[in-house]
Each structure stands twice: as structure tokens, then as C-alpha cells.
Image (cartoon, rainbow, N blue to C red):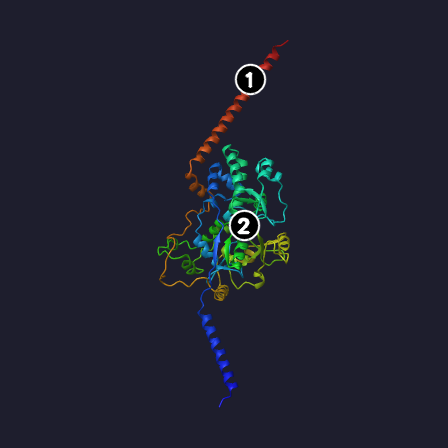
Amino acid sequence: MHSSASISSDKKKIFKELKGFICKIFRYGKTKRHTKKYSFRQPDLKELRNLTSYVLDPLGFKARYGKLLPLLTTQVDEGLMGTLVQFYDPLYHCFSFLDFQLLPTLEEYAHLVGIPILDQLSFSGLESIPTSQEIADMLHIDESLVKAHMTNKGGIQGLPSEFLIAQATVYGKAMSEDAFEVIFVLLIYGLVLFPNIDKFVDVNAIRIFSALNPVLTLLGDTYVSLHLRNAKGGGAIVCCLPLLYKWFISHLPQTVTFKENKGCLRWSTRLMSLTNDDISWYDRVYDGVQIIDSCGEFSNVPLLGTCGGISYNPILACRQLGFPLKDKPNNILLEGVFFQEGKDPQSLKARMVRAWRKFHKKGRNELGPKNCIALEPYTTWVRKRASEYLMPYDYPRPTPLVVAGPSTLPNQGVIDDPDDAWASLLPQSSKFWKRRYDRLAKEKADMEAAYEREVKRLCAAYLSASRASRDP
């Protein structure tokens, strides 16, 4: 006869085994993680698009300021971007899929926006705030007007976009090209590249614009916002969304089947069905590019955005720039750091600023021939990460039961070549050609007037000399 103590002990043992069995069932049955609710800061760009009719020299504009104009015409598919951000991996600061990883890089952003990366840290937030006089001189506006319209929103100074648009319009109508362009470009920086506050160009955008080296900050804002919102469990992602969109669709399959999506599959199903063999990995425009690989004390690359700082891992993006991925990366190379502006107990900002005084690049000699391959040791490591972190969506069924979404890949408005972008933009309005004609007519009239003045001056000089020669 068993004692009550032994029965109690047996029950505990059985309960423990049962609990372990249930946990195993739950663990193995769990195939996806919960998705999060994200939104995106997307300003209304109608008035900015209207200002494009005053750009009289598109090629010159591109040479001076980069491929900013196509960003104004990019039609972003929020469904696609909302699906993409579900794949953000907070451990490795990238987008992790079933057997591959993707991450926007400095080199890709520099190409897409058409602005080179200068050999210096472009923005730290430690720079002095420009005075009203400095802003006035930069924008060709009276200092009194700048002072009168300088405003404080959300704890940061800046200028209302309404005021700047009005000033740009005045200069555009007067065909003052230099004055118009500098205000117009500042508006693009403040509302499109760094959309911090609606209808407001803050001093951070002004400081970044004055340096004309925005790529590091653009990528920094992208990663900082993705990482912060992921940690918070969702919310509004604030970065240059058209640029992130252009980057992502550049890697999506270029096949007719994928683009047309005749089955009207959801983006979640379409992205979950992709493998590393489907991705468009490499563009020949990066043939001569070297990768910014590390900075100072950091084994990867620290990025400072307008709202914080974060590290990103170029070693994971080698394939996107043509180089092979052979093995599991060393954990030291993937060390993740992050801080939110105003919350920096480890003084990461100061360390990041110092790190950019010495950065390192790698090319063919260090990374091998450009063959865009990924070997099994690396792919196995990615698959293991996918199984540990879980995917945000179910694996696609052979015949999905629920279908919805666009019938074609929404990249019709995204044109990499700014000349092509203008070819599509200009027919929208005859104002462009009228402004061009008016400018040429004005130049012709000015030249004729100058010619007449010169003829009169020469005639007067001749008559004066002739009289002098006749006088005794």
C-alpha cells in the first residue's frame, strides 16, 4: 500500500512530465510571431509638385542636388511597406526572411538619391543652430522675414512650409533660378527627406541641407525609426519612405509573373514565398563601389539620425553590392548598439562622432570577386535565425484561400533615372514650357537691350572723338 507522500510525489512527477509535453506541443506548433501595427509619416506633397514647373534646368538641378525630383512622384504602396517592416530583425538590424536577409546600405541610398557620401560625419545634432541672418543669407530672404516666421514646434525651431513655399513661388515667377532652387531644395529636405513635423522645416533639416551630405542621416533615420517602433510594438515610422520603398522594390523579383500578380495574392504571401534565388541581388552601377565597412572603435558602422543613433551591419549586405556571403558572420561584427535622442547613458553619440573621424572601406581585395553568391554555411545560419525568431506570417499554401491586393507591382511611378522621371512629370503641366519660353524671351530681350546700349555708347564715343579731332 502506497503512502500518501509517495502518491503525492508521483502526481507531481506526472504533472511535471505533462506540463513539459504540453510546452513542447505549443512550441512546435507555433510557426509565426505576432505582427505589429505600423503607420508611416507621409506628408502631402501637392504644393511641392506644383513648384516643379519653375525648375527650368532639370539636368543642372540633378547635377547640383541629386535625384530629388523622382522622390516627389514616387507612389508608395503602404501595404507593401507595412508588410516589409514586419520582417525587421531587432537583433541584427536588418530584414530577415526565410533563407536570406536584406538591409538598406549607405552605398545603395547614395545611388538612389544621387548624392555622394562625403568623407565626414554629416550631422550629429551637436552643430550650432544657424542664426536668422545665416538662414536669410542661405535662402536669399530678408532677415526680418526669417525672424518674423521662425517658430518653435515640438520643442524644435524651424520655418513653416507655407512661408517657404510662398517665397519659392515669388522667386520662381521672377525666374530667379538660384534663389528659387535653394528654397525648393530646402523644402524637399524638410518635408520629404526628413519629415519630422507636418508642414514644418526644422533646424535639423536646415543644418543637414547646408552641408549637402544627407545620406548618412537618411539611413540613420530609417534604422532608428524602424528599431524604435519595433521595440515599442508598433506606431508611426518617420523616415524618407519613398527612398526606402525605392530601395526595397529594387530587390524584388523582376519576373513578369511576380510583377503582374494575376492571382491577386496578399503581399504577406508573396514575400513569404520568396527565397534567396528569387531576389534581384545586384546592379552593375555598384561595380566600382567600395563598402564602408567599419568606423573607429566600432566593428560595424554607427549611424546618427535626427532622433538617435544605431549600428548597422554592412557584412550582411555584401551580396547586395556584388560580393559573396560565405560563412556565418562573426558575432563581434554584428554587435548591436542603439540609443534614442535624450536617452544616452553610455555616451554613444560622442563615441559615434569620434568613430567617423576614421572609417574603413573594403573592396575586391578584401571581400573577394563579385559573384553575388551565398554559400551554405551562411544560408544555414539565416535559416536558424528564422526558426528562432519566427516569421511574421504563415508559410504560403499551394493555393491560398484568401486573396486580396493589387494586381501589379506598384512601381510604375518609381523611375531611377531622373531624366525619365522628368519625361513623365513635365507633360502634367504646360507651365514648364511657358516658364522656359518666358525665360528665353527675357534673355533675348535683355541681350537686345544690351546690344542697343553698346551701339549707342560706341556711337557717342565715336562722335566725341571725331569732334575732338576737328577742334583746333
Quarter assignment of residue 343: bottom right
Residue 203 appears in view: no
Instruction: Report the residue that reaches farthest toward the top.
Output: 472
- Residue 207: image x %, image y %? 59, 45
Q: Nearer the viewer, mark 1 or mark 2?
A: 2
Seen in the picture, residue 249 relative to 327 is either above or below; the reply is: above
**Quadrant location of the C terminus?**
top right
Q: Amino acid at mark 1?
A: Cys
Instruction: Report the residue that reaches farthest toward the bottom.
Output: 1
> Dot 1 corresponds to which residue?
459
Which structural element holds mark 1? Answer: helix
Seen in the picture, residue 415 relative to 139 is either above or below; the reply is: below
Q: Which residue shows up at 58% across the image and 38% down it? A: 148
> Dot 2 corresponds to which residue?
218
Residue 449, numbered circle? none
Seen in the picture, residue 168 relative to 320 is either above or below; the reply is: above
Q: Amino acid at mark 2?
A: Leu
Left or right relative to 101: residue 469: right
Judge the density around disc 2: few (<14), some (14-19), many (≥20) Cα neighbours within 10 Å. many
Residue 366 appears in view: yes
- Residue 175: image x %, image y %? 51, 33
Judge the density around disc 1: few (<14), some (14-19), many (≥20) Cα neighbours within 10 Å. few
Q: Count the marks.
A: 2
Instruction: Report the residue that reaches farthest toward the front.
Output: 4
Which of these two is toward me, 239 or 232?
232
- Residue 13: image x %, image y %? 50, 81
- Residue 9: image x %, image y %? 51, 83
Which of these two is toward me, 320 or 163?
163
Badge 1 or badge 2: first in the primary sequence: 2
